[in-house]
Structures are given as C-alpha cells and as structure tokens.
Amino acid sequence: MRAAVRAAEIDRVRNGWFAAPDAHPDLVRAVRVGGTATATTVARMHRLWVHGDARLHVRVRHSTGRLSSPTDRRVPLDREEHGVCVHYSTRGGLDRARDPLTLALAEMFACTDAATTLAAVDSAIDRGVLQMEHLDLLREWMPRSRRHLIDRVDPGCQSGLETRVRLLLRGKRIGYRSQVRIEGVGLVDFLVGERLVIEVDGRAFHTGSAFEEDRRRDFVLTMRGYLVLRLSYRQVMDDWDRTRAGILALVSRGEHRWAGRGPYEEGTA
C-alpha cells in the first residue's frame, strides 16, 4: 500500500482509507471529512431530482469530535466555509464510503425541506432505483416527526417540478389527477378539477418536433374547452410564489370547472 501511494497509484484519504484514481470525488471528500456520504450527496450520485443544495452531506458517529476539511485532512472542518452538512448518527454502516440510497433519503428528511426530499423520492421510484416496498424501511429510518410525509409519495410524478405542483394541490385540498390520458392528446401531467390542464416542462427547451407536438396538444385541448397552463422550469423553481398564486387564483375563480364551457368535440361550433 505504501508503495502504491508513493507511485501515485492510489491516494491516502485518511488513516485506513485509500482512494483509486477513478473514485467519485464526493466520496473521497466525505471520507476525508471523517464519515460517510449521505442524504443529498448520494441522491445526486443517483441522478435524482435535487434542487438548490450543493453542500456535501456526511454522516458521522454521534460521538465524533474532530472533523476535517473535505479537501485537506490537516485543516479542521468549518461547516459554513467548506459547505458541509454533518449528520450525527447512532446507526452503523460507517465503514462504507456512502450510505445505501434508502438510508440516504431518510437522512434527507432530517435536513432538507419536504418538497425537495419528496421530489427526490418520487424521482427515485420513477427511475426504478427505489421500489414502493422500500418505503416502509425509509419510514422506519427517517425522523419520527416526519414519517407522515411518506404518505405523500406519488410514483406517477416524473420530475421534481411535478412534485412541487402536486404538493400545492394536495396541501390546498384541490381535486386533481396526475398522468391523465385524454383521447387525441395523450398523457397530461395534471388535470385539476374538470378542465384545468397543467403541463410542467423540464429544464430543457423543446425544439423541433417536440415543440410542435406540445403546441398541437395545447391546440386540441383548447379547442375542446380545456384551460391549458404550461409551466417552465423557471416558473416552478425560481418564481414559485407568483406561479403558486396564479394557480390558486384560477381555482378560486372556478376556472377548473366546466360551468357551461364545454367539453366540446372537434369540429363543433
């Protein structure tokens, strides 16, 4: 091992821990701090939906004293300066470089807002890296005061944007269905009440055939009397207060009800 370190074939991270050249940088940083990568850090490694948290999340023993900088073992950890969130834990498994996904998501519930964490869980199920039967284990490991949030998981949500809209509708007890199939249109993200269709576009801007298909769908829905609300990534993530208020205003005015507006068949006047 000493020869491999001298030859720069491996890197000594801390006592008893060595890293190969292709080791994930966040795992190396977490081990150098003195613990195990967890929470949002592991969720990012699984390419789950995570927004607005670039910190390194490290789970350590509850009795741990001195922790180190993620870049230099000789420098004491400054959580703010080094961007590290420390999770003190009595649970085992600290002999690994990272937590399994189920435990990492449970740790997310301890330090991240409910909407962001539920978006990560929804996307994990959608991507197939987490199964519905794992939710009971997740519930067991997460903070007791937040276990009720597991009941809000929806495997039909395909992105964190959809999760945010869904939690708003559910929180306000507004009737909706997700991933509804409408003849001639296909699946829509949300059908609120009877006629308000909410489509949530991802970060990517649709061009070419995808752009044209979105407009065709919107046209068909509008001609049948549906009200179509197409939301962008920025509207949901960066301008949420205004977007939220707009959705609630439409519902307050009864725009989600037919109330003599239709539905209409194509070709009728």
Image: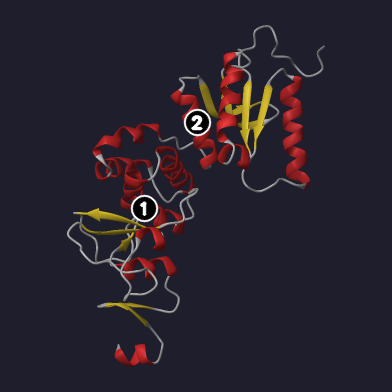
Q: Amino acid at mark 2?
A: Arg
Identity of the residue drawn at 24% across and 63% down: 94
Looking at the picture, does residue 187 appear above or below residue 96? above
Residue 63 found in image quarter: bottom left
Looking at the picture, does residue 228 appear above or below residue 107? above
Please indicate, yes or no, whether residue 158 appears anywhere in the rendered image: no
Viewer-proximal residue among 9 and 124: 9
Label 1 sits on a secondary structure element that is helix
Q: CA distance from mark 1 to mark 2?
A: 23 Å
| Residue 250 in picture, x, y percent from top left | 61, 19
| Residue 88 in picture, x, y percent from top left | 24, 55
Residue 92 found in image quarter: bottom left
Q: Residues within 10 Å of mark 1 (few under 14, many from 20)?
A: many
Q: Residue furthest top?
A: 260
Q: Name the image colouring.
A: secondary structure
Label 2 sits on a secondary structure element that is helix
Of the 4 image quadrants, the one containing the N terminus is: bottom left
| Residue 98 in picture, x, y percent from top left | 33, 62
Q: Amino acid at mark 1?
A: Ala
Per the image, the residue denoted by label 1 is 39
Q: How many marks do you count on the picture?
A: 2
Viewer-proximal residue among 157 and 72: 72
Q: Which numbered circle lies on residue 166?
A: 2
Looking at the picture, does residue 136 appear above or below residue 92? above
